[in-house]
Amino acid sequence: MIRRTVTAALVAAGVGLALTPMTATSADISRAKILASTCFTCHGTDGHSPGSIPSIYGFPAEIMIATMKGFKDGTRAATVMNRHAKGYTDEEIELLANYLSQIKR
Amino acid sequence: MSGMTRRNFIRALGAGSATAALAACGAMPGKSGKAHVVVIGGGPGGATCAKYLKRFDSSIQVTLVEPNTEFYTCFGSNWVIGGLAQMSDIKQSYASLKDKHGINIVHDMATGIDPVNRKVTLKGGGTLSYDKLVVSPGIDFKWEGIEGYSEAAIETMPHAWKAGPQTTLLRRQLEAMPDGGTFVMVAPGNPFRCPPGPYERASMVAHYFKTHKPKSKIIILDNKEKFSKQGLFVAGWKALYGDMIEWVQSTKGGKVERVDVANKMLYADGGLTSFKGDVVNFIPSQKAGKIAFGAGLTNDAGWCPVDQMTFESTLHKDVHVIGDSSVAGTMPKSGHSANTQGKVTAAAIVLALQGKPMEAPSFVNTCFSLVGPEYGISVAAVYKFTDGSIKGVQGAGGVSPADAPLSFRKQEANYARGWYASITDDTWG
């Protein structure tokens, strides 16, 4: 929310491009990026699992949101994901889902 | 401090002037590209941090200092002890970190840290200068405090709590033990590396005995009153191994006070209670890794206090301590914890070098344990930084359900192996 405010303020002021040189060395480290990196321990870097745990990259955000919310409210069965999903707010689930949906390969 | 920066930045924007915003951007150091980050320790904490530093900002120079050219993971080493896996299955290399991620790997032992002049000295004689330092040295053992016990005892009573030759030694002792023998494990008091580890190990030894030496017994002498996933372990032991495993809590004779290493005898209750093992696995009490002490990074308890949002030491600026050595709120000392701490620390360092405020950190821990080859259990938690420390999110996490069917245990055993594949790839791959 804060980030959106900042961006909006800059765009409104006509200095949106000023962000580019500031972050030239890398993509922004967003809250979503930090959140998603915690998923990668079990689901593989960038959500590409090398083993028996499902991969989580590239899913349409709405499908991931529905899945996580299902884990969270118990309507979707799981072994450990019910316990994990309860640790995130709906807003965090949306951030995560959007971030993961943009990882294509 | 990060919160202040953020507020200032927003206030500057709030002033409504584009000039103010540009000035704020111009004031950002933006020097991350020239920065050199040194990481001491190539375990799950240090290796993950090095990799994610590069992922978050590829222009940063990252040097990883690790004495071993190959790394044997502690997680999975119980599976080797139980005969389910080989040492080659738990061996990791630094090739991807070097070749794929561009990390400078220095196979040397860091022997000293000069936090004032920001230098690390190496056993081989070299020196490394850093802008930011990450220290991830794992654990060291407390050899003192038990009469008759010393570091020399590990050749007779292996701890096998750092994977490698000790793992192999314990496995060989178990293989050499006759059927009908007794395996005694001495489990440490809190806090220690891998809280469910001793009990997974007892399970794996029980599996080996059941399939090869069914008349044998297992005794766990514990330096505490309860243990991780206790209900699930005890139920699993009963289901798979009957009464093969006996657990003795500290107040019921489990607190070992004296050992006779040569005769593999252990004494408790002022000598009134004694146990003899054919194989003894003595896991000593633990403290932060050795270099943390020399560098003045430890507190009176022998662990490293840190700002739990960034893992920067509260004792030395620009030095971050992660993994088992750090005091990380309610997070357990585990490879999984170290991995997620490594990522948060990488983000904190990159953002600090870019002159940006730290984002809200997030951490996870998931510890899978095999009670049997097809019988897995887990404990999980999601952690956030609140009111100055890392705490588990209320209402989330916890252990596997007590009343789950065998199909559930089998799926968790499957995921335990999947977890191993994923975390090792995420850390070293």
Image (tube, grey):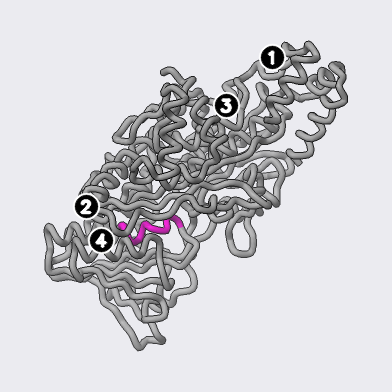
| Quadrant in which the C terminus of chain B appears | top left
Queried whether the magenta region covers residue A3, the answer comes back as no
Is residue B140 at all visible to an observer of this figure?
yes
Q: Mark 2 near mark 4, Cβ–Cβ under 8 Å?
A: no
State how far apart marks 3 and 1 are (Cα).
16 Å
Identify the residue at image location x=19%, y=58%: B207
> Which of the chains bears the disc numbered 2?
B
Query: Residue drawn at (28%, 40%), measured in percent from left and top?
Result: B89
Q: Secondary structure at mark 3?
A: helix
Residue ID at (57%, 44%): B135
Q: Which residues are magenta?
A: B193-200
Q: Are marks 4 and 3 on the same chain?
A: yes
- Residue A91: give x, y in percent of width and height: 57, 35
* Crowd class of label 1 (few under 14; some 14 to 19; many from 20; radius 10 Å): few
Q: Above or below — where is B64 with respect to B230?
A: above
* Between A93 and A46, the one nearer to me in the picture: A93
Camera-nearest residue between B200 and A7: A7
Q: Quadrant of the N terminus of chain B?
A: top right
Q: Is residue B195 magenta?
A: yes
Tag 2 and tag 1 share a subunit:
no
Q: In the image, which is nearer the foreground, mark 4 or mark 3? A: 4
